[in-house]
Amino acid sequence: MADSGVAPAITAPRGVNAALPHDSAERHVAGSAIYGDDLPEPPGLLHVHLGMSTRAHARIVKLDLSAVRASPGVVLVLSAQDIPGENDVSPVIHDDRLFADGEVICVGQSLFAVAATSIAAARAAAAKAVVEYEDLPAAIDIAAARVMDLKIEASQRMARGDAQAALDASPRRVQGGFSMGGQDHFYLEGQVALATPREGGDVHIWSSTQHPSEVQHLIARVLDRPHTAVTVEVRRMGGGFGGKETQASLFAAAAALVAVKTGRPAKCRPDRDEDMVMTGKRHDFEVAYDVGFDDEGRLTGISLELASRCGATTDLSMAINDRAMFHADNTYYLPAVEIVSHRFKTHTVSNTAFRGFGGPQGMLAIERIMDAVAAEVGLDPLEVRRRNLYGGEGRNLTPYHQVVGDNVAPQLIDELAASCDYEARRREIEAFNESSPVLKKGIALTPVKFGISFTTTHLNQAGALLHLYADGSIMLNHGGTEMGQGLNIKVAQIVAQAFQVDVSRVKITSTVTDKVPNTSATAASSGADLNGMAALNAAETIKARLVEFAAAKWNVAPEAVAFTPDGVRVGGETFEFGWFARQAYLARISLSATGFYATPKIHYDRATHTGRPFYYFAYGAACSEVLIDTLTGEMKVTRADILHDVGKSLNPAIDLGQIEGGFVQGMGWLTTEELVYDAQGRLRTHAPSTYKIPTCGDRPAHLDIRLWEAGRNVEATVHRSKAVGEPPFMLAISVHSAINHAVASVGDYRVFPELNAPATPEAILMACEDVRSRAHA
């Protein structure tokens, strides 16, 4: 049949909507998946170690590296004056130094680089550096930065209506505040870069980064070379979560600079402690609120003040804090609202992108407010949430003036509440709490509405490169990066679906800047939206050429050519796909194409904080049940039920995994992960011995996760799917609210607990004692 090209009947191709495993799943399990530190070390490899500041804020009085240079095994030592281009690895504001120059602004700031024949030799040499400081005033936390009036930019205001007038006229009013901590990304694979020199001063870098193009551009800036002189490649990362969006550049630039200056390959891989000390975290926030409402718990006006610790440099803090403002409404209509955001500069490592990108902080604020209002009016918090949901005309405008046109939160909430038997369980839990003096239970159901798109409009673009080979195999390359989230298999499924072939025909290749240029970071939950559509456009370009070819060769109308699971149908004949591809090649048809996609409809005016920053919203809801010990503060999430909207799922198996992972990571942020800095600005929780991420034992014994069957996307996304990377993270807010419910029972629900995040055992214990004291005062 190969000679005639007649295709045998086959089963339907495994394209979109199929629950396929991650493309590297077998390699992950077998340990054969190749990461940055697994790459074969080339001859002459130099190991790069970065010397770090031990001061939070100081003038460098003396930096003597002579002993470092003389140390055994050392080949090269670099500091600020050795940079041929700009001493900068920042994403936006040009304020992140590759090496400190005259002043240090946080503990862990890079001072110099040592390149040696082994990492042990490089570390031993770096310890011989003589650094003398003159300490300067340092702001370690938000309170100190507030006193010193240190900000990365002016405070921002977002408003709709007259919040103050609405508050003054409100029947009831409550004021309060709380704080939430940061979070370390704790990716399994740490930061790593391997640079190899090429002729003419060019360089190739394997980098564990979510943003290869940015790493390329920043290295070119440091080297004072054009972008074409630098090639950055990424096959996969062992986790990113935002921590490799901007902060991979420091390590990649150091390795690249060593490689170019020595003509030898160079690798920079900090160990876990160094990684945690040197890299930024999720922004910690302080929240103050003034909210007005009626006797039924419906909000009438709200004033919300957000303050964040941005760290020593700008990084992405402006956009992150903007997104916190965007999500301070969550699923709720705020009739009159004012949101003020303060972005404080502190002498701690610069905080950066983290899953949700400020959204979780804004969302936790409004959910905490919903719990507070419910406590004031004596209603079930779920009922208060329902009464404040976005609705139709007159109740569908966000604080930033975007219309919420596809509000499915009410349906999701109702369906989940019924399926998990929320009302009966809440009654049972409160009856249990009456008879249990030590152990207390809590339950909460909270929704999620998360905006999808980069709020920096120009980042909403993507490219792809597709080659159809003469044997019918397909090579796929796109600008997105694979960090374990399953992006590559989804985009491969999209391409397979376009040609109606099995996904096994599609070869996924490394993301590399010399194939698809000027790419955006794989972030903002938009990886599949952007890159999937770009790949589909490339596939459609090739398909159009093939249709034209077939119509001419077999003398049929273009409409008579169709790609089917059985092969390519031309008139009354069906040809095997590989045979057909070869005929096109022999006829000199171009079988390669680029694809491009730019998200439509979005626009945003940052000066007024108004517009349509999001193409659409992703929704979800979670009901969590917890058990606490009021004598020790220990807590266990015993059950969680999740219903999440992913539109028409591209890959249900991948989406379910993302939802579970996001929820558990969110649990960690809100319950166990605590960042502690001492008075000198040193991070004291810089290893798994002191920083506690969730383990398999923290996963609820009952965890029911379902994709919403009615899910769809009214916007023309790829196959009407919805993003799933970040939205599930906020489902874990239900855990914090459930803990609040359990703690409140200590005082018979008469006082609202002062429960910050993370709700560690110590925090829960102190909240219980406080509630008990105030309730019986």
Image (cartoon, rainbow, N blue to C red):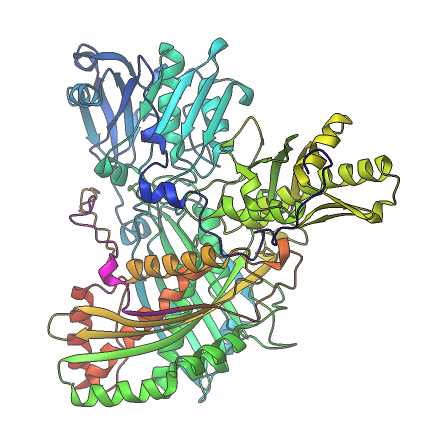
Nearest to the observer: residue 651 or residue 7: 7
Q: Residue at x 45, y 24 (%)?
A: 219
Residue most extreme to the left: 631
Q: Residue 628: horizontal and vertical position, in percent?
A: 19, 74
Nearest to the observer: residue 673 or residue 320: 673
Residue 687 in magenta stretch: yes
Q: Residue at x 60, y 76 (%)?
A: 395
- Residue 395 appears in the picture as rendered: yes
Q: Residue 24: horizontal and vertical position, in percent?
A: 42, 42
Q: How many marks?
A: 0
Q: Is residue 497 left or right of residue 740?
A: right
Q: Residue at x 68, y 41 (%)?
A: 576
- Residue 168 appears in the picture as rendered: no
Residue segment shown in magenta = 685-704
Residue 436 in magenta stretch: no
Nearest to the observer: residue 75 or residue 131: 75
44, above or below 724, in the image = above
309, above or below 333, in the image = above
Q: Main secondary structure of the magenta part?
A: loop
Q: Quadrant of residue 372?
A: bottom left
Q: Residue 108: horizontal and vertical position, in percent?
A: 25, 34
Quadrant in which the N terminus appears:
top right
Quadrant in which the C terminus appears:
bottom left
133, above or below 198, in the image = below
Q: Residue at x 30, y 73 (%)?
A: 639
